[in-house]
Amino acid sequence: MSDEVPRIGVAGWPVLHSRSPMIHGFWLEKYGIAGSYGLLPIPPDDARHFFANLPVSGANVTIPYKETAFRCVDETDEQARRLGAVNTIYIRDGKTIGTNTDGYGFLAHLKATAPEWRSASGPVVLLGAGGATRAIIGALLDDGVSEIRIANRTLRRAEELENAFGERVSAHAWDQRAEILKDATLLVNTTSLGMKGNPPLDISLAQMSKGSVVYDIVYNPLETELLRQAHSLGLVSVDGLGMLLHQAVPGFELWFGHRPEVTEELRDLVVASLVEG
């Protein structure tokens, strides 16, 4: 599709909660770019047809369609193939191309917020084994992390990631989640535990050394119980909102031809919407 004015949206079900239109709308106005970005609520029965016959100029893809989009676009890049999931679709030469910017968003935000952290600092612990976990593992391995320990409520899913990513990744039972924090320099919660309306994340961070980093990809609430505990122990806490903001950067550039900046003004705008909502 070759619209003169790009028409982009975020596809999912449900999708009304998404802050992506706010983020991209802010950039479109800031840079004076002609185009639009809206919500694309796609019922499950329509998903395959939508992604196989994309009626817009490009799209972000959110739950539960990242794997469906991966199977339906014309082409995928190396990053999407590695993860088996697409969160960004753009069009080149009449073909829909799928990529995945989740790992980029995670790492860009981590390095901007905790610049003292280094991939060579020591082991990393991830809680969870979903699609976001895969993207984060890929980003960390590419950045040079030598050991990643995964704890998940269903051990089998953590073992699937261990098998998929190789010897630098190890799977652990959920009841070992506090134990495997010993000597870890970074903990990342990739589960929905601690999110508004969900059960809390029950874990002690006592084994982590001061100066280590705790990153929660949950951003509603912005300060989770996990991050409060981290702060009380002298650990560096990183909230999940920055990952959402930074993962949007490559997509905007692909669709509109301008690389945007993640600024405090944009962050404040989204934070205000979370407080209001």
Image: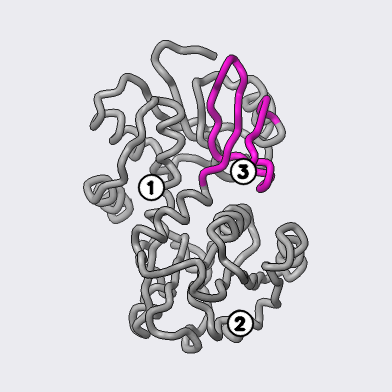
The residue pinned by badge 2 equals 180
Local crowd size for mark 2, using a 10 Å CA cut-off: few (<14), some (14–19), many (≥20): many
- Please indicate whether residue 245 sits to the left or right of residue 11 in the image: left
Q: Quick one: quadrant of the N terminus?
A: top right
In the foreground, 64 or 261 = 261
Q: Is the image coloured rainbow, by chain, by secondary structure, or in one colour? A: one colour
Labels 3 and 2 touching (C-beta < 8 A): no
Magenta segment:
72-101
Q: Residue at x 51, y 35 (%)?
A: 60
Q: CA distance from mark 2 to mark 1?
A: 30 Å
Q: What label does residue 221 carry, if any?
A: none
Badge 3 marks a residue whose secondary structure is helix
Badge 1 marks a residue whose secondary structure is helix
The residue pinned by badge 3 equals 79
| Of the two numbered discs 3 and 2 in the rendering, the one whose residue sits closer to the viewer | 3
Q: Earlier in the sequence, mark 3 or mark 1?
A: 3
> Quick check: 96 above or below 77?
above
Residue ranking furthest to the bottom: 206
> Quick check: 227 above or below 139?
below
Q: Residue at x 59, y 22 (%)?
A: 54
The residue pinned by badge 1 equals 245
